[in-house]
Amino acid sequence: MSVVTIPKEVLGFVNVGTYRIAQSMEHMPLLLEQKVLHSKSTIKVAIQVRSKLSNPDDLSEFSIVVFIPSAVDKDSVTIASGNGEFDSFKRCITWGMEMLPKGESFMVSAKCALDKIFVASQGAKVLEELNFPVMLRCRSKDRLGSVRFETMEADGHPATISSSVVGKSYRIVHRLN
């Protein structure tokens, strides 16, 4: 146990500590799924995100990024659903969303075609190795429940502590290859 001593001359609230935490999550508060469909030279990529009912709060500040491989003709990329933007220089599509209430889901999708010159030079193995990596970022809130404070009377002077539910907001980055 640690003891913090505060001189009597100090009036008002006193900050007795700060913390910063970084951690990997075992149980993500969301489910991220990707489906890639091939039909001859046309490809459709669909991404679905579902917020779990067990979350303590809604998820917010979403951004979903799908990276477009070099085997795809960048001029053929179109957004099929959602308000996404394609950056041809970075070869990625980005969708944004302000909030996803717990228990709800949404889907975004895009269409594209294979680059004929690239396919001609690489052969049939292009379809086997075609990969559209996905990265999702969002923010969530949770409560910090493992902190306990106690006060003790010191030399006849009463000690008090004010407490409240301590909350934290954290940023989630989830990658799907």
Image (cartoon, rainbow, N blue to C red):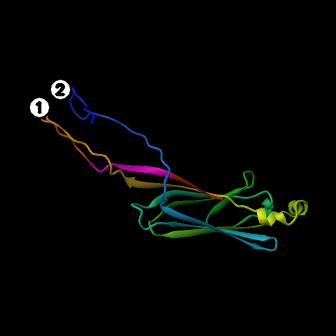
Q: Residue at x 72, y 51 (%)?
A: 90
Q: Is residue 151 above or below residue 142?
A: above
**Magenta span dominant secondary structure:** strand
Q: Residue 72 location in percent, x, y?
A: 79, 61
Q: Are marks 1 and 2 in contact (CB under 8 Å)?
A: yes
Report the number of numbered marks: 2
Residue annotated with mark 1: 157
Q: Residue at x 49, y 59 (%)?
A: 28
Mark 2 Cα shell of 10 Å, populated few (<14), some (14-19), many (≥20):
few
Q: Amino acid at mark 1?
A: His
Q: Secondary structure at mark 1?
A: loop
The quadrant of the rendering that contains the N terminus is top left
Q: Amino acid at mark 2?
A: Lys
Residue 114 visible in the current orientation? no
Magenta highlight range:
164-171
Could you tell me how far apart the alpha carbons at marks 1 and 2 are, in whole angstroms? 9 Å
Q: Residue 110 location in percent, x, y?
A: 69, 67
Residue 34: name its quadrant.
bottom right
Q: Residue 124 location in percent, x, y?
A: 85, 66
The quadrant of the rendering that contains the C terminus is bottom right
Q: Residue at x 52, y 69 (%)?
A: 105
40 or 25: nearer the viewer: 25
Queried whether the magenta region covers residue 55, the answer comes back as no
Residue 133 visible in the current orientation? yes
112 or 132: nearer the viewer: 132
Q: Residue at x 41, y 54 (%)?
A: 141
Apparent side of residue 65 relative to residue 169 in the rendered image (left or right): right
Residue 96: name its quadrant.
bottom right
Residue 161: name its quadrant.
top left
Residue annotated with mark 2: 8
